[in-house]
Image (cartoon, helix red, strand yellow):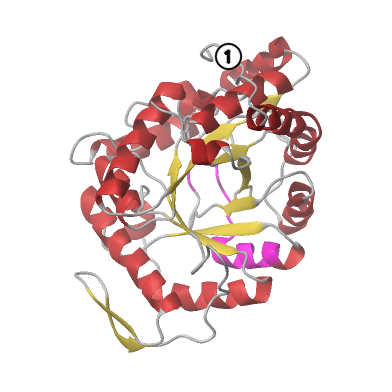
Amino acid sequence: MPEDKTNLSEPLKFAYWVPNVSGGLVTSDIEQRTDWGYEYNRELAVLAEDNGFEYALTQVRYTASYGASYQHESTGFSLALLLATQRLKVIAAVHPGLWHPGVLAKFIASADVISGGRAAVNVVSGWFKDEFTNLGEQWLEHDERYRRSEEFIRVLKELWTSDSAEFRGDFYRIHDFDIKPKPEFGPGRPHPEVFQGGNSTAARKLAGRVSDWYFSNGKDFDGFSEQVEEVRGYAAENNHAVRFGLNGFVIARETESEAKAVLREIVEKANVEAVEGFRGAVKQAGKSSSDGKGMWSDSEFKDLVQYNDGFRTGLIGTPEQIAERAIEYKRRGANLLLLGFLHYHEDVAYFGKHVLPVIRELEADAERGAATPEPIGSFS
């Protein structure tokens, strides 16, 4: 696909998955020097913003599932991290159906004002049926969940930008409603940023109509390019601008063999029962889409050990190898890489010291007109 010249002129952004859920970012019995508690995460947030991370994404789980026995609620945890940092933007993952958009709009507006314009949301249409049904909430058919998410996002934006909000849809109705304070307003930021993931056609069309950012699960180069091209097509049809984030799991070591040895150990020590349980849940979610293209529909066991297919992005090797792959993803449309790590404190610091400078050097070379290095071969 053709290069996005505008994208290439902007520095690649970085986000990290907040480990506010126990069990780390891989469903494995390998040692993970990562903790789900607040003190660990407060220190991590400061460390991350000092090592080149602009965003953090707080996970949403409401009940024990698939190796995650304990969970901190995403919006409250996000506000705590905003208060602990100076520059970091924190994205709270939320579920339509478990939140009313008017209540969430009010919470995020307050968090945004308190933090000086650093709050954001990731709208999760839902894959874990038990989180809804065990709370007595209706579990909608796949594409209906995305229809509800579109209304949810439209209501958020209407409430954040209008002094007399009006909306009439199939799921939500708002009449002459005003929230004050409004979120922070600035150049290029009319409201808090709205992120959204998914892989199905319904998810891609949603991004092309209303979302500010589209998150992709881990993908190889061609898989990511295919998603970007299709979402851009839907966005063009709707005269809408959307940016792209890509999930990846980073294992950066001095040698490629060291990094791949860590990956092998993670997979060999996978918690098989937890991975298979997760696999069963997400397979039904992915295949329930109208076209069978939902998230995880083609994921293998080893992919699901990192539960957002992060290994498939191939950010595993030396700092130079990882940097070259990151630049190739940027060339193919990525504005942001959403990263997970095994030992967060150590690995985030290593990324900031050893990987990020190489990425910035490659970006500077591209700005000066130097040829972009040939990408490392397909990861395996």
Residue 226 visible? The answer is yes
Is 74 colored magenta in this rendering?
A: yes
At label 1, which amino acid type do we have? Glu
Query: Where residue 242 appears, x then y in whole percent?
Result: 41, 50
Instruction: State the residue at coordinates (38%, 66%).
Output: 98
Query: Where residue 329 appears, x then y in whole percent?
Result: 52, 29
Is 26 colored magenta in this rendering?
A: no
Q: Which residue is mark 1?
A: 374
Q: Secondary structure at mark 1?
A: loop
Q: Is residue 150 left or right of residue 223?
A: left
Q: Residues within 10 Å of mark 1 (few under 14, many from 20)?
A: few
Residue 151: which quarter of the image? bottom left
Query: Where residue 86 appears, x then y in whole percent?
Result: 75, 63
Question: Toward the viewer: 339 or 324?
Answer: 324
Q: How many marks?
A: 1
Question: Toward the viewer: 356 or 169?
Answer: 356
Quadrant including the N terminus: top left
Question: Toward the viewer: 91 or 277?
Answer: 91
Where 238 falls versus 27 (above or below)?
below
Where are the magenta residues, as a range? Answer: 65-82
Residue 23 visible? The answer is no
Instruction: State the residue at coordinates (71%, 25%).
Output: 252
Instruction: State the residue at coordinates (64%, 30%).
Output: 250
Instruction: State the residue at coordinates (58%, 39%).
Output: 9
